[in-house]
Image: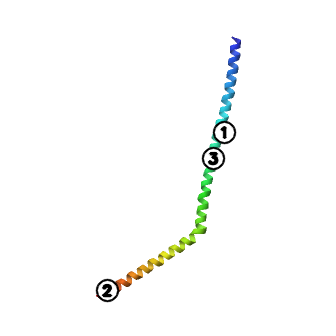
């Protein structure tokens, strides 16, 4: 009977050590996942920031030029339309 009790104590100790080891491993995995999420968030924030800065520094002058060209084209179209309307009223 004493041998059975000693064997059970050893099994309980092994089980306790195994549970502690498993618990430690699970905590490490959760901590690693948390840091992975934080670093992924920082990564995407950096990508968005760099993209915005690149637009502002490199592309914004070109976009402004295209907008000016569009405004000039629109004004020319309006002038042509006004000319055609005045020409049409003169011929009647």
* Image quadrant containing the N terminus: top right
Image quarter for residue 85?
bottom left
Calculate the distance from the C-alpha at mark 1 to the C-alpha at mark 3: 12 Å
Q: Categorize mark 2 by other alpha carbons within 10 Å: few (<14), some (14-19), many (20+).
A: few
- The residue at 66%/39% (across/down) is 28
In terms of secondary structure, where does tag 1 sit? helix
Calculate the distance from the C-alpha at mark 3 to the C-alpha at mark 2: 73 Å
Percent x, y for residue 3?
71, 13
Image quarter for residue 5?
top right
Percent x, y for residue 74?
44, 77
Q: Categorize mark 3 by other alpha carbons within 10 Å: few (<14), some (14-19), many (20+).
A: few
- Residue 36's disc is 3
Locate residue 55 relative to residue 6 in the image: left or right: left
Locate residue 44 relative to residue 4 in the image: left or right: left
- Residue 89's disc is 2
Q: In the figure, 14 relative to 68: above or below?
A: above
Q: In the figure, 77 relative to 36: above or below?
A: below
Going from N to C along the chain, the mark reached first, 2 or 1, is 1
- The residue at 54%/74% (across/down) is 65
Q: In the figure, 36 relative to 86: above or below?
A: above
In terms of secondary structure, where does tag 3 sit? helix
In terms of secondary structure, where does tag 2 sit? helix
- The residue at 66%/36% (across/down) is 25
Percent x, y for residue 89?
31, 86
Going from N to C along the chain, the mark reached first, 1 or 3, is 1
Residue that numbered label 1 is attached to: 28
Q: Residue furthest top?
A: 1
């Amino acid at each position: 009977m004493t041998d059975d009790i000693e064997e059970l104590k050893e099994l309980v100790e092994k089980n306790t050590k195994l549970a502690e080891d498993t618990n430690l491993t699970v905590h490490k995995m959760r901590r690693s996942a948390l840091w992975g999420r934080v670093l992924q968030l920082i990564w995407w924030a950096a990508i968005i920031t760099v993209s915005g800065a690149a637009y502002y520094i490199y592309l914004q002058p070109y976009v402004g030029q295209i907008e000016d060209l569009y405004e000039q084209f629109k004004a020319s179209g309006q002038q042509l339309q006004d000319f055609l309307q005045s020409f049409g009223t003169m011929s009647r």
